[in-house]
Image (spheres, helix red, strand yellow):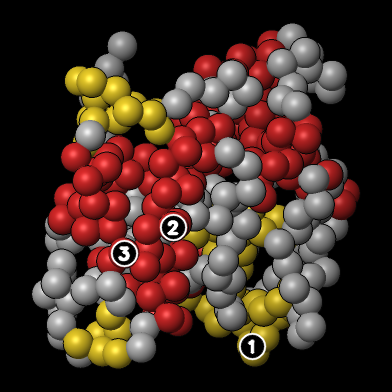
Amino acid sequence: MCCPNCFDDDFLSGFISLKAEQKGLCSFCGLDDVPIVAPERLAPYFETVLEGYSVKIGGRFLWELLAEDWAMFSPGTDARRVVEAVLGGIAAATYAPRESTSAPSEEIWGQLRKELQDKNRFFPQNAPDKELFRVLMENLVSQVVPDEFYRARLMKDAAPYPLDEMGAPPAALASDGRANPIGIRYLYLADDRDTAIAEVKPSKGALVSVAAFGILPGKTLKLIDLTDPRATISPFRVTSPVADVRASMSFLEALGEELSVPTQPHRATRDYLASQYLCELIKVSGYDGVVYRSSLARGRNFAFFDVAVCEPRGAVTVYTVTDVEVTAAPLVA
């Protein structure tokens, strides 16, 4: 018997939690008094994922591929035993991923990035197919959106910013950002206070105004989560062929890296071109914003395309930055 805790895949863990008719001891992770189901009940779903792989002599075992390609299993789970229990004899064969002729790659994103910076700004020849891009994005819709967000502003003096000045700047003052081109307003928020403060890059002793925000009541937003595509995408709910999505994973990871990688202030305008283009593609594909890793703290950042979808909550709080940690590494040529 297996339990929800055996899997990092939210589809599988959710299925077991919903369909389990009893609680007991999990045979694979050792937890007791948890919802459990017979492994073979998962077989129809695993068989759909097998469409992305083919038997190959000298290939790799299926549990290795599923763990590597989809981050499917929780730490400590014996993935081999789980897959063998679910699929039986076919798990003994070795496999290789099926090739995809339509999936974009990390190399394609690199070519587009260079073209946007050095050659064509508005009509790039390496632009991804919009329909294919839309289909890929459907697999990255965030399943969990926080109830509360935070925004910080560095203070010029001891007076905190009023609450009505803690949102996005006016269009005339909207400078280049990771997601927004100059003059176009997006609302940048973080899912925890420390990340919001880190994102304004304060010095030690700086004063920072922080406000909490929440999504307007009744608003349902579709956000693209680029923090970790391999962990976000479940192969059991993909809306396109498994082989295409698996082959596109390096492309999707490159998109997330584009939004998260740190850059020098004097290079920001040029370096942000590709991430701004990416966000425009996501916006015109019908989504409300993007979620991406912070390069300065452990939280997540959110860029909302419509600055009016969130409202401030409560009062502005002032914080003093008591420490700024700096680490360095030698530059490798």
Q: Which disc, if any, is residue 315?
A: 1
Q: Return the disc, 1 or 2, that comes first in the chain's sequence.
A: 2
- Which residue is pictured at 71% across the width and 77% down the height? 215
Question: To which quarter of the image does residue 280 belong?
Answer: top right
Q: Which disc, if any, is residue 40?
A: 3
Label 3 crowd (10 A; few <14 / some 14-19 / many >=20): some
Q: Amino acid at mark 2?
A: Pro
Q: How many marks?
A: 3
- Which residue is pictured at 36% across the width and 88% down the height? 21
CA–CA distance between discs 1 and 3? 53 Å
Question: To which quarter of the image does residue 125 belong?
Answer: top right
Label 3 residue SS: helix
Is the C-beta separation of discs 1 and 3 under 8 Å?
no
Q: Return the disc, 1 or 3, that comes first in the chain's sequence.
A: 3
Q: Which disc, if any, is residue 44?
A: 2
CA–CA distance between discs 3 and 2? 8 Å
Query: In the picture shown, does residue 91 fall above or below 43?
Result: above
Percent from the top left, x then y, of residue 36?
Answer: 28, 80
